[in-house]
Structures are given as structure tokens and as C-alpha cells.
């Protein structure tokens, strides 16, 4: 008996989107990036946007995002993705343009580009992976690192008197007139994955409707940087990250 006799079409509920390439992902086991890649690819395919999409690849763990989602990509210098996306969208206004950035890329070196693109109301989507640590470069403290959280550069835990407070940049972006949709989601369970996929679709719909900038923050895990198993990382995220970065819509115009 072959698998076709066991897995009937009506029972196959979650197939692979055609927009994900066959390249093996470089992410650590348990990393949230792969799930988010799949969701973005699925939404682009379902909306028929493959030929119209231009994505901006970041610097950081997701630097090779262009290897995994089969759309047109441009590589941006560290933190400059919103500026490059603004240029692409203005030159090619009918394209579906998005950036894909981590907390170090978006909320540290790219703070200025992020804030001003959102303040201008560029018709782009920004997908922001917040795992509160620099994953690729060795687990250093990020702007979003929690108070008391240990990293390679604050081994005793983040001290607000020395390091300042965790940066809730999505809350800041929600205050800007140019943003039309700012939401904070996650992908640690099925219900959360469904909500995040809806948020991604809404961001693309807003861009097409020329409503302004959409920001989808996805609170994520970095089990390697955190020094935890994937299962324990999800538990730690729910017990600690969600308290500082509560899920839900921050702005929905």
C-alpha cells in the first residue's frame, strides 16, 4: 500500500505552498522564522500576488529570506529596509512591497528608517520578528530585551538604570498618523498562527488600498539565544514576553 492510498485529498489539510522553495532553511530547530515564512508565502499565493510582490531582505537571522520565498527580492543594508521599500513602492506603485525584519534590524540600527517610513504613510507592509535578542551575532542584548533578561552583553540581566527600558516600538508606531494598521501577534500554537495569517493578509490588503503603512509585529522565540529547548522557549515567551508585549491590535483604521 502506498501513501496515496492512506492520505486522501480530502484528508490533506495542510499542504506546502508553491511559493516556498526547495532550499533547506538554515534556521535553528524551533525557530519562529520558518513558520512566518510559510504564512507570508501562503498569503501571497492565495491573493495571487507572486508576480506583483517585491520583498526587502534584512540583515540578521533572516538575511537569507530570499532563498525561501519565491518572489522578487532586494537586499537592504542593516536597518534600511523601510527606506528601500519606500523607494520601490514609489517607483512601482502597483507592486506589493514588504519588509521582513528582526528587532535588531528594525528597532535598533533601523529605528529612524522605520519611524519615518511609517510617519510618511508609505503603502508598504512591515513584518517585525521580535525575539528580544540578537540571534545571528551571538545573543547580545537587543532594544526589546526584557528587564532582567540575561544576554551575552548583559550576563547579569538587563538593568534599566544602565541599559534603559525595553523598547515597545510598535506602540510608538501606532501613534503616527501614517500607520493604518499596527498589530502584535505570535505563532506558538495553531490559534495564534491563524490570527497571524489574517494579520498578514490584512497588511497586504491595506497596501493595495493605499491606506498607509501596516506593521505586523510577531513575538517570537530564539531558543538558541535564550538557551532553552523549543518547548521551554514557548513557555518562557508566554510567561514573560507576552506580559511586556501583549498580543492584539494596537491600531486598526
Image (cartoon, grey):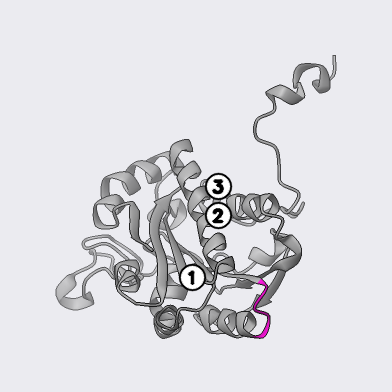
- Residue at figure coordinates x 48%, y 49% from the top left: 196
Q: Nearer the viewer, mark 2 or mark 3?
A: 2
Q: Residue at x 60, y 69 (%)?
A: 63
Quarter-wise, where is residue 48 in the image?
Answer: bottom right
Percent position (x, y) of residue 74?
67, 77
In which quarter of the view is residue 207 placed? bottom right
Q: Which residues are magenta?
A: 91-95
Q: Tell me, for residue 201, which label it has, or none.
A: 2
- Mark 1 or mark 2: which comes first in sequence? 2
Q: Residue 211's mark?
A: 1
Residue lying furthest right: 1
Residue located beneath label 3 in the image: 29
Whether residue 64 is situated above or below residue 31 in the rendered picture: below
For marks 3 and 1, give the CA distance: 37 Å
Precedes in sequence: disc 3 or disc 1:
3
- Label 3 with label 1: CB-CB less than 8 Å: no
Residue at 40% in and 85% down: 112
In the foreground, 162 or 123: 123
Q: Is residue 34 visible?
A: yes
Amino acid at each position: 500500500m502506498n501513501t496515496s492510498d492512506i492520505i486522501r485529498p480530502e484528508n490533506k489539510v495542510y499542504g506546502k505552498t508553491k511559493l516556498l522553495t526547495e532550499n533547506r532553511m538554515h534556521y535553528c530547530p524551533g525557530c519562529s522564522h520558518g513558520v512566518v515564512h510559510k504564512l507570508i508565502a501562503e498569503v501571497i499565493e492565495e491573493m495571487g500576488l507572486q508576480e506583483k510582490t517585491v520583498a526587502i531582505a534584512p540583515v540578521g537571522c533572516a538575511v537569507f529570506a530570499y532563498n525561501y520565498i519565491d518572489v522578487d527580492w532586494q537586499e537592504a543594508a542593516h536597518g534600511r529596509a523601510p527606506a528601500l521599500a519606500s523607494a520601490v513602492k514609489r517607483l512601482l506603485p502597483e507592486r506589493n512591497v514588504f519588509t521582513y525584519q528582526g528587532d535588531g534590524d528594525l528597532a535598533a540600527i533601523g529605528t529612524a528608517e522605520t519611524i519615518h517610513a511609517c510617519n510618511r504613510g508609505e503603502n508598504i507592509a512591515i513584518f517585525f520578528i521580535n525575539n528580544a535578542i540578537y540571534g545571528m551575532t551571538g545573543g547580545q542584548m537587543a532594544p526589546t530585551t526584557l528587564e532582567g533578561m540575561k544576554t551575552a552583553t548583559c550576563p547579569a540581566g538587563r538593568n534599566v538604570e544602565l541599559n534603559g527600558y525595553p523598547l515597545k516600538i510598535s506602540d510608538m508606531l501606532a501613534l503616527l498618523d501614517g500607520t493604518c494598521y499596527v498589530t502584535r501577534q505570535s505563532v506558538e500554537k495553531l490559534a495564534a498562527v491563524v490570527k497571524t495569517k489574517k494579520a498578514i493578509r490584512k497588511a497586504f490588503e491595506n497596501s493595495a488600498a493605499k491606506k498607509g503603512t501596516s506593521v505586523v509585529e510577531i513575538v517570537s522565540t530564539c531558543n538558541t539565544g535564550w538557551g532553552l529547548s523549543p518547548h521551554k522557549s514557548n513557555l518562557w515567551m508566554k510567561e514573560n514576553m507576552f506580559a511586556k508585549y501583549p498580543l492584539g491590535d494596537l491600531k486598526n483604521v
